[in-house]
Image (tube, rainbow, N blue to C red):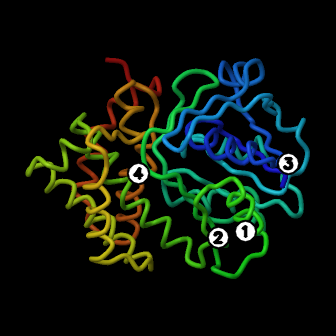
């Protein structure tokens, strides 16, 4: 397959790199020092499942150099999505599928608004990885996994073709007939660990064990479930229990990507995590005080990172 990856960071670099190592034609769309390093030295990936170094790498800044592709993995941060979609429009052909891999649940609708219904699937990934240095990705936790599927739940030969390509790259991949629910299940997990982790400035092993922050975590999860149910997504008590089990199974030093960005003073996905829970809760008449607290308490740092506040 011919696959474009926009956002060659911890997610895009890892999964795109695995596909390229398996012989698929992968084009990374990137910028800055990371792009320059890949063009000069290739893409180095350190992984719990085995290191690899992809050399040479097909990496460009201008998508118009690429031409239409079979699939686009959109692996930029949620707040970068609108700009990213405008950049990839030239490579979306009649048969192209576009799969968002951001943390959050609103990306498919944003993509549909800009590209129309036909190209867009839902998707999610599970992995702990990040850019360690330009041209260098580190996978440090969680078995890498991809799940994607048609937004209306229909069987999909195009999704199955991409699944087979990832299977050939030895990536745990599954096509879902209820991708919206699965995206909300991941959202439940990521809102909890990113919000509570960021506000406590502590890794998962600390905030899940401390009774006071454990209660906050459980309140955050309960609100996400209530909002999901109001929207028509069938999360339930089992979803809460399995999410807590997953959080309890994480390595003690686990830090979510949003938490890492906030600690480093970078723009983060706060608006698409706790902010989205609060916003959707208001739309559907669901109280979300725990998520509102996280959002309000973290907002000054977010605005400073974006140059909207000085202190």
In this rendering, which labeled residue sits more in front, label 3 or label 1?
1
What residue sits right under mark 4 in the picture?
273
> Height in image: 180 above or below 144?
below
Q: Earlier in the sequence, mark 4 or mark 2?
A: 2
Q: Name the residue under label 2.
A: 149
Residue matched to label 3 = 91
Camera-side residue of 68 and 41: 41
The Cα atoms of the two marked residues, 4 and 2, are separated by 22 Å
Q: Which of 56 and 298 is in front in this view?
A: 56
Residue at position x 77%, y 61% in the image: 97
Assess disc 3: are there few (<14), some (14-19) or many (≥20) residues with their C-alpha within 10 Å of its C-alpha.
Answer: some
- Whole-percent x, y for residue 70 in the image: 83, 57
| Element carrying mark 3 | helix
Q: Which mark is residue 159?
A: 1
Image vertical order of residue 229 relative to residue 275, above or below: below
Q: Sequence order check: which comes first, mark 3 or mark 4?
A: 3
Tags 2 and 1 in contact by the CB under 8 Å rule?
yes
Q: Which residue lies furthest to the front in this view?
A: 50
Mark nearer the N terminus (1 vs 4): 1
Answer whether labels 2 and 3 touch (C-beta < 8 Å): no
- Indicate which disc, 3 or 1, sits on the residue closer to the N terminus: 3
Q: Quadrant of residue 176?
A: bottom right
Cβ–Cβ under 8 Å for marks 4 and 2: no
Quarter of the figure with residue 284? bottom left
């Amino acid at each position: 397959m011919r696959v474009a990856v926009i956002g060659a960071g911890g997610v895009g670099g890892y999964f795109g790199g695995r596909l390229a190592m398996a012989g698929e034609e992968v084009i990374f769309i990137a910028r800055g020092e990371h792009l320059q390093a890949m063009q000069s030295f290739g893409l180095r990936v350190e992984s719990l499942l085995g290191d690899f170094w992809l050399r040479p790498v097909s990496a460009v800044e201008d998508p118009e150099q690429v031409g239409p592709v079979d699939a686009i993995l959109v692996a930029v941060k949620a707040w970068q999505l609108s700009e990213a979609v405008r950049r990839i429009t030239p490579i979306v052909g009649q048969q192209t599928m576009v799969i968002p891999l951001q943390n959050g649940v609103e990306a498919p609708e944003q993509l549909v608004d800009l590209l129309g219904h036909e190209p867009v699937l839902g998707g999610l990934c599970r992995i702990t990885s990040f850019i360690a240095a330009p041209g260098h990705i580190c996978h440090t936790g969680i078995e890498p996994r991809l799940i994607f599927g048609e937004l209306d739940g229909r069987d999909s030969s195009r999704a199955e073709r991409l699944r087979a390509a990832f299977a050939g790259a030895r990536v745990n991949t599954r096509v879902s007939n209820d991708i919206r629910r699965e995206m909300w299940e991941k959202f439940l997990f990521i809102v909890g660990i990113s919000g509570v982790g960021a506000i406590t400035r502590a890794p998962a092993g600390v905030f899940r064990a401390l009774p006071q922050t454990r209660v906050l975590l459980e309140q955050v999860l309960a609100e996400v479930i209530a909002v999901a149910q109001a929207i028509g997504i069938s999360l339930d008590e089992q979803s809460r229990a399995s999410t807590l089990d997953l959080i309890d199974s994480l390595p003690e030093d686990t830090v979510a990507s949003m938490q890492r960005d906030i600690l480093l003073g970078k723009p983060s996905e706060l608006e698409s995590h706790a902010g989205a829970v609060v916003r959707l809760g208001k739309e559907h008449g669901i109280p979300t005080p725990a998520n509102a607290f996280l959002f309000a308490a973290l907002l000054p740092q977010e605005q400073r990172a974006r140059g909207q506040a000085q202190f």
